[in-house]
Image (cartoon, grey):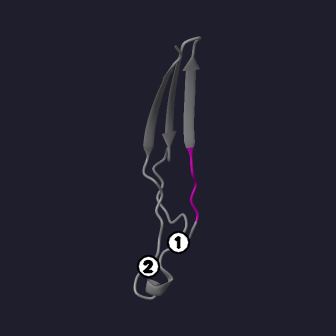
Amino acid sequence: MGGYATTRLAARLWSDRLSLGLAIDNLFDSAGDTFAYGNPFTLKLSGQSTPHWPRTVSLEIHVRY
């Protein structure tokens, strides 16, 4: 599988009624094989790999009524 690192950066601001959150997963956009499960019957025919998720940015907004 090789070496890889996972990263997440997150921040949240809140008040009595409103909450805002921002998160970035796979901050450095690293690539690699995280887990090679695949199909055991095709192992000799082709390589098996499970790549990282791409860099992902999430925005959350919560409002209390």
The residue shown at (54%, 63%) is 34
Q: Are marks 1 and 2 in contact (CB under 8 Å)?
A: yes
What x and y, as percent, mark residue 21?
Answer: 52, 27
Q: Is residue 23 above or below residue 20?
A: below
The stretch of residues the image draws in magenta is: 3-7
**What label sits on residue 36 in the rendered view?**
1
What x and y, as percent, mark residue 3?
Answer: 58, 64
Q: Predominant secondary structure in magenta? A: loop
The residue shown at (54%, 12%) is 17
Return the residue nearer the eye: 31 or 21: 21
Considering only order in the chain, which callout, 2 or 1, is on the residue closer to the N terminus? 1
Q: Which residue is mark 2?
A: 47
Query: What's the residue type where badge 1 is placed?
Result: Ala
What x and y, as percent, mark residue 18?
Answer: 52, 15
SS for dot 2: loop
Query: What's the residue type where badge 2 is placed?
Result: Gly
Measured Cα–Cα span from mark 1 to mark 2: 9 Å
